[in-house]
Image (tube, rainbow, N blue to C red):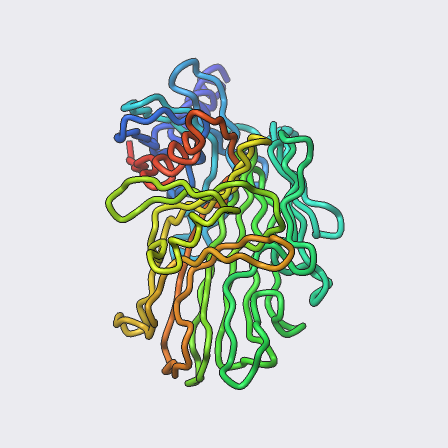
Amino acid sequence: MRKLVGYIFLVLFLVSCSKLENLPTIVVSETEGLNRPLAYINTKLSLGRELLANEMLVAIDPKDGSTILMDVKRSVESKNPFEYAVIFPVQMEANQTKKIKLQINKKESTSFPVDTVLSEDNLEVENSYYKATFSSEDDQRGGQINGIYLKNFKNQVLKRSHIAMHWAPNFSKSSSELYFNLEDLQTDSKHHIEIEKYRVVKERSGITDSVPEILIEGRYEFYDKLPYFLFESSMTVQREVELNLLRNDEMTMDSLFTHLAYTKEDGTITHLNLYSDELDVLEENHVSDDAEWLAFYNLDKGYGFGSIRLEYNNTNVNGEPSPTHNPYTKITKSSNNGRYWNRVLSDTIQRFPVGSRYYEKNAYLIFSVNEENPDKEIREFAQRLKHPLLVDVVKD
């Protein structure tokens, strides 16, 4: 009997050890000399077996051995039945490398330490820095961002009074004076919201009634405890169409800012007063269409809002250039002293053949401003976002 009991304990020990020994290690490296107070690791890995219903996968902090909760989902795109997509937070010092071990524990009722919340009607999402609202004028499910409340600036609201604040991507047919965007999709179009442990994801895609030749796709990602959200979009021409305007990365706002800052092609940064004649220099000396970042800021109230351009690609489905016409980033003086920016891809009557495609991915950042160094925070975030942590999944 004693031999039997000993054998059972031996088997259980070997099984538990095999869970640890067969799990991969996630190696995270900071190679740009930048401190990362908070970043999210978003990667895929194979466990070599199925994660059971009563089990949970966790990461082990190499510094103190504490448990890091992970958001774990089966990777639906993979043919490997044991591959999982994981997301978890890390803090990294400049030039640091961490070897993060994984562990399978018995599933417990665990509360994730997050403060990102989606409203019951799916029309608001908020974290500790902001609350973003979605426009529902044309789609009750909620289209694009309508306005943003800045929690650290007395709930200052960024908005455009008569239209949605976020207005990209958008286009107009040569036979029409109306613009159409991601909110104007047909009512049966794809609209999907995923509430995850560390982020909320909102996806929309489809065509509009007025310009059915173009497939529009858009995706928002709102991460916990970060002062920015991600947005990516694509426009793909499915049938040849004639347009007189094609744009993306557009934010329209009321008179809420005092200055503009943007990066030039040589890496220098230019600051202009949004309400003086010096802004007129941009009528001939445009901001580049691929400027690394640009921002509006209010020097008196100490807040800023900007676009960090992470990806920009106008390659068609065959890998060749899609039609554009003198692309640039436009800063516009609008009615009632409003100001907005957008990336103009084409502003002339032009035919767009089948397969033309236009893609963007941006981080929209809320940041603090001081008079001595107003662009300090957005420069730091741009460096981090454009040089992400290196992640390598290594099998032990």
Is residue 19 visible to us here?
yes
Residue reaching furthest right? Answer: 120
Residue at (30% x, 47% y) in the render? 264
Front one among 93 and 177:
177
Of 75 and 161, nearer the camera is 161
Q: Is residue 312 left or right of residue 194?
A: left
330 on left or right of 226: left
- The quarter of the picture where residue 92 lies is top left
**Residue 9 drawn at (x, y percent):** 46, 20
Q: Is 68 located above or below residue 281 in the figure? A: above
In percent of width and height, residue 317 lies at 33, 73
Which residue occupies the foreground of this view, 177 or 127?
177
What residue sits 43% from the left and 25% below the top?
Answer: 372
Q: Quadrant of residue 190?
A: bottom right
* Whether residue 276 is situated above or below residue 227 in the rendered picture: below
Work out which quarter of the rendered image holds the C terminus and state it: top left
The residue located at (65%, 73%) in the rendering is: 188
Q: Could you tell me residue 210's position as x and y percent?
A: 59, 81
From the viewer's side, name the closer residue of 330 and 224. Answer: 330
- Give the image location of residue 341, x and y in percent: 49, 55
Report the label total: 0
Q: Residue at x 53, y 33 (%)?
A: 299
Q: Would residue 52 be visible to someone looking at this image?
A: no
115 relative position to 84: left or right: right
